[in-house]
């Protein structure tokens, strides 16, 4: 959201585009790593006696 507000009233320069892409890539990397950790944690848990969904 901060990026949208920053460039809402001015044209983006090349440096602005580089900064924006770097921040988006960093956010995606963190988000993806969190997803992978949660996925591994779920896979490592002992399965409980649960009826399959039909």
Image (cartoon, rainbow, N blue to C red):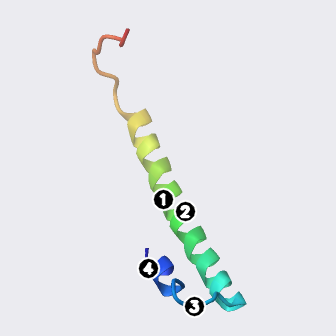
- Locate residue 16 relative to residue 27 in the image: left or right: right
The label nearer to you, 3 versus 4, is: 3
| Label 1 packing within 10 angstroms: few (<14), some (14-19), many (20+) | few
Tag 1 near tag 2, CB within 8 Å: yes
Closest to the observer, 19 or 49: 19
Tag 4 near tag 2, CB within 8 Å: no
- Locate residue 6 relative to residue 18 in the image: left or right: left
Precedes in sequence: disc 4 or disc 1: 4
Label 1 belongs to which residue? 31
Label 3 belongs to which residue? 10
Determine the image quadrant of residue 11: bottom right
Label 4 belongs to which residue? 2
Estimate the spatial distance between the alpha carbons at disc 1 and disc 2, rounded to whole Å: 5 Å
| Label 2 packing within 10 angstroms: few (<14), some (14-19), many (20+) | few
Precedes in sequence: disc 3 or disc 1: 3
Q: Secondary structure at mark 3?
A: loop
Estimate the spatial distance between the alpha carbons at disc 2 and disc 3, rounded to whole Å: 25 Å
- The vertical placement of 30 against 51, above or below, is below
Estimate the spatial distance between the alpha carbons at disc 3 and disc 4, rounded to whole Å: 14 Å
Estimate the x, y position of residue 47 in percent, counting from the top left: 34, 23
User: Where the N terminus falls, by quadrant?
Assistant: bottom left
Estimate the spatial distance between the alpha carbons at disc 3 and disc 1, rounded to whole Å: 29 Å
């Amino acid at each position: 959201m901060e990026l949208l507000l920053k460039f809402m009233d001015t044209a983006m320069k090349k440096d602005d585009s580089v900064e924006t892409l770097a921040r988006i890539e960093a956010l995606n990397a963190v988000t993806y790593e969190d997803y992978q950790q949660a996925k591994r944690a779920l896979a490592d848990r002992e399965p409980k006696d649960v009826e399959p969904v039909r």
